Amino acid sequence: MNLKGKVIAIACLSSVLFSACGDYQKALKSEDFELKYKVAKELYQKGEYSRSERLWEKVVAYYIGRPQGEEALYMYANSYYNRKKYMLAAYQFERFLKNYPRSEKAEEVLFLQGKCYFLESPRYSLTQDDTYKALDRLQEFIDRYPNSENLREANNMVLELLNKLQHKSFEIARGYDKIRDYQAAIKAFDNFLIDNPGSNFREDAMYYRLHSAYELAKNSIKQKEKQRFEEAKGYYETFIRVYPESSYKEKATKMYQDIIKKISEL
């Protein structure tokens, strides 16, 4: 392309961009909601979500309850989702479901709302409010749409969230063991194992329950030593029966040998 051609191409592009920018500014200042809607939709379809959002803010409230409201609210929520503003998207998805519960898009919207909370779910050591919200929405989605094409992804997200909650619960129990509050640790591990029978942390929980019981017995008054060593012995036997090849086997066996010795001396 020669210089003249390049100049013409740049001029044409500038003209298009100026026109688009002019339409946006005009719609933004206008009181014509049909114009706002038209320009917001055009921007959304071009992937210009940030600018479209500013127009949807004005448009959505006006059109809710009217034929265009369903589409407007969906695009508004999805604009936030596409820009990774997941909490804002989740709020607008919730708004959509309340206003249009029978919409053809309700299935997709419920899934995306759950995914928003999933993506905002923090690491296990922090407060898990968004994790519980994600589980609530995703479970509702799974129950309502068991044949959805998004079912596998929803189930995988649920499993990941449950594992995160189990990790947090395990670490709380482990924390009691670390600060030598062994009675609280044993109780916490017992509850963990009852509540999470298939957890990835089950082996760890059973080992540290044994460790807590062993340390509690060692530090008990004479009157309680025999009973507590017997309890620790029972925890070892359960642990080694379930995990005979555990990576904790050597440590557990050393504790067991000392437990047997202590019991024989009492």
Image (cartoon, rainbow, N blue to C red):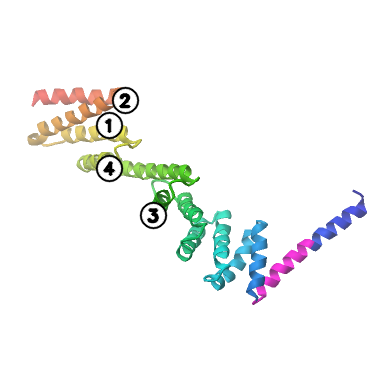
For residue 254, what is the image quadrant?
top left
The reply to whether the C-beta atoms of the residues labelled 2 and 1 are less than 8 Å apart is: yes
Gap in Å between the C-alphas at discs 2 and 3? 34 Å
- Residues 128 and 98: in front is 98
Does dot 3 land on a helix, a strand or a loop? helix
> What residue sits right under mark 2 in the picture?
246
Which residue was labeled with disc 4? 195
Q: Is residue 26 above or below residue 261?
A: below
Q: Position of residue 110 (x, y in %)?
A: 47, 55
Label 2 Cα crowd, 10 Å radius (few <14 / some 14-19 / many 20+): some
**Circle nearer the N terminus (4, 2):** 4
- The amino acid marked with disc number 2 is Ser
Q: Position of residue 225 (x, y in %)?
A: 11, 33
**CB under 8 Å between discs 4 and 2:** no
Q: Can the viewer see residue 179?
A: no
- Determine whether, in the image, residue 216 is placed left or right of residue 79: left
CA gap, disc 2 to disc 1? 9 Å
Query: Mark 4 to mark 1: distance in Å?
Result: 17 Å
Task: Tell me what residue is drawn at x 17 percent, y 26 percent.
Answer: 259
Q: Who is closer to the viewer here, 152 or 21?
A: 152
Residue on which the image places disc 1: 207
Q: In terms of sequence position, does the residue under pointer 3 or pointer 1 come before the other?
A: 3
Q: Do the residues bearing badges 2 and 3 touch, measured as CB atoms within 8 Å?
A: no
How dense is the environment of label 3, judged by Cα within 10 Å: few (below 14), some, or many (20 and up)? few
How many C-alpha atoms fall within 10 Å of the one at disc 1: few (<14), some, or many (≥20)? many
Q: Secondary structure at mark 4?
A: helix
